[in-house]
Image (cartoon, rainbow, N blue to C red):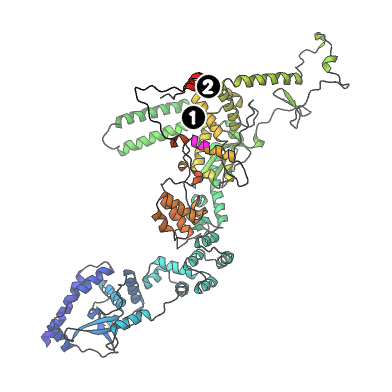
Amino acid sequence: MARTAKKAKSVAVTTAEMTADAEIRNVGDVLANVIAALPAPDAAEHASVEATETVAASGEMVFIPLNKLKKSPRNARKTPHTEEEIEAYAASIAAKGMFQNLVVEPELDGEGQPTGFYLVTIGEGRRLAQLLRANRKQIKKSEPIRCVIDTVNDPFEISLDENVTRTAMHPADQYEAFRELAETRGWGAEEIAARFGVTAHVVRQRMRLGAVSPRLMQVYRDGGLTLDQLMAFAITEDHARQEQVYDGLGYNREPWIIRRDLTKTHVAATDRRAIFVGAEAYTEAGGAIIRDLFTEDRGGFYEDAALLDQLVIEKLGKIAAQVQEAEGWKWADVHVDYPHGNGMRRAYPQPVELSEEDAAAYDAAQEELERLSAEWEDADVDLTPEVDERFAELEAKIERIDALRHAYDPDAVARGGVFVVVSHDGEARIERGFIRPEDEKPEPDEAEDGETVIDGVRVNGDGEIIESSEYDAGGNLVSDLEPEDEEAEEDGKPLSDLLIRDLTAHRTLGLRLALGEQPDMALLAVTHALAAQTFYRGIDATCLEIRPTSSYLASHADGIEDTAAAKALADRHSAWAADMPRDVADLWGFLVGLDETSVMALFAHCASLTVNAVKQPWERKPRAHETADRLATAISLDMTAYWTPTVRTYFGRVTKAHILAAVREAVADEAADRIAAMKKQPMAEAAEQLLAETGWLPPLMRTAQPAWLDEPQAEAPAANEPEAADPAAAEDGEAFHIAAE
């Protein structure tokens, strides 16, 4: 008998060693290794166990070694426990012990004799958790487990009963309980997570839900709110604000609407102001950032918009002071948004000659760069770090000296100032050369009676033309009363105003007739008229009565002036402005000196600033909008180069039906079906991702292709067949217009 007992003990030790030898890294491996290591007892072992062990009676509580417990094949649960569930069991048992006993029955062999092992009818998840702890060396594999023997009830039925006949805690109770643990016991999310076997993020989510207003939590308990809606309210812990938004909700209670209303007074972390200041500086100043733990919040929301604006102005002010001190401007002003319509004249940098020193340095750097480029152009190896660094130094030097080729007039710097604003990408944007009206050079002195002469015409102080009196008090023409003796007339007497108007009217008629016969000069004259009013103060520098008007687009589309397209247009305008002569009187000579391509480019730029295709709800301009469509087709406008549909620009501002239609058109019906059940905000975000890089545009933004592309192409004539001439054209003597290849 002693020898048999010794053999049984040896088998148990071998089993433990086999399990301990393997290095298990997850719950699945633990189960596979431990179960595989358990021996299948033979008849001899059955006899030894029968001789050494006595089976307890049904209903008796006993302590059974962990390695003597096995899964019952009659357990009603067929779906295995997940690794997350077993981890949670293990963490709970490690922190607080096992609250519930395992219910087991003795394992019997084919002859109905006990094998010494026990089948777990109730508590399989706890058994697996203890196996996991044993594998992690937290407990022994022979750890005694408190069990209750049940040989009376049907194992299948009681395992089913144990899983069915119970009431789960309401989620609201769970959320509030997690919150209470943190508040009353001072536990952090990590400690609570360790004690309950969940992630710290899950704990934070439950604690945040537990912080929702008790009134709204009760509405949730009563079924008046869904979990998604409750999560939307949890974006803020301000109970009063939560209840205010709840009371103001109408029939549409979509979670994204709740989030929008709760954060409408906050600033998104993706806002250019938030990017400019930065989260660290904002929090150091005492600001709080609200994070949405249930959706992708892209950095959260800055709660104190006033504090954020204050920090923006302070940071802009420091940059403005540095620019003013370094460049010598009279003033520097800061704004969050670019101050359109400021009423100031703007001066632009003018071409200047480089100093001899800078010119020599530029030539030397350019020469060295060309030499290095030639040396390494055909090299089969990569640039060495030293050469690559030298290339960067030379390019930076050339760029710095190139910038010196344009400079502001010292007088403009002494009178003018700069605006420092926040650009669309969250960087400081510096706009120079603005001159306030009070800093302009004084105008020529007027006569005592307020009269002055403009282009030979006398005007009064109100700008009204002063008519010359050709009649005396008696109504007689002065010319009829004047003596015919020319010697009696005063020497140097100017022509009468009436005669001047008469003569210049005839001259104007001649100009109109002649200009209409010279298209090239007409183009130059129109370009001069547009450029004079686009780049210079006042509109009296041209004799063409053309008044370009440019609509202020920022009043129609918020943030449009900070887009990349607006930046490109501003850069093009600044480049032309830098080339303009300082005095508008020299503009004509400047234009005459340009080649035809440059004149056309300047004309196109000035004309482009007058385009207005904005549709206003109260306007009725169908012909203008038709012309805008034709213009878009003529210039092959591709709006994908300037605009992209995003949540902010499109998807968040249209209905779900529009979103799904866009996805169906741009991607596929299957993609639209996948997101059809989503809420509005997640659907909009998903659509933005799906349509990225597809080039899709709303119908309003599309450009119709030219009509000739829709026409069937005529078959080309055979090489030996002459083209038939149009009889009508031949009779009229009209030439055929064939495009030159």
Q: Is the magenta region chiefly helix, strand or loop?
A: helix
Element at badge 2? Answer: loop
Q: Position of residue 331 (x, y in %)?
A: 60, 40
Circle 1: is it few (<14), some (14-19), or many (20+) Cα within 10 Å?
Answer: some
What amino acid is labelled 2 in the image? Answer: Gly
Q: Position of residue 213 (x, y in %)?
A: 53, 70
Q: Give the farthest residue toward the bottom.
A: 57
Q: Is residue 631 magenta?
A: yes
Q: Earlier in the sequence, mark 2 or mark 1?
A: 1
Residue at image location 34% in from the left, 23% down from the top: 719
Q: Looking at the rendering, in which quadrant would you find the C terminus?
A: top left
Instruction: Tell me if I can see residue 484 in this picture.
Output: yes
Question: Which segment did they paint magenta?
Answer: 630-635
What amino acid is labelled 1 in the image? Answer: Arg
Instruction: Tell me if I can see residue 269 in this picture.
Output: no
Q: Looking at the rendering, in which quadrant would you find the N terminus?
A: bottom left
- Return the residue at label 1: 405
- Return the residue at label 2: 593
Name the one closer to the observer, 507 or 31.
507
Name the one closer to the observer, 318 or 507.
507
Q: Position of residue 343 (x, y in %)?
A: 63, 39
Up/down of 488 relative to 633, above or below: above
Q: Specify the quadrant of the image occupied by residue 38.
A: bottom left
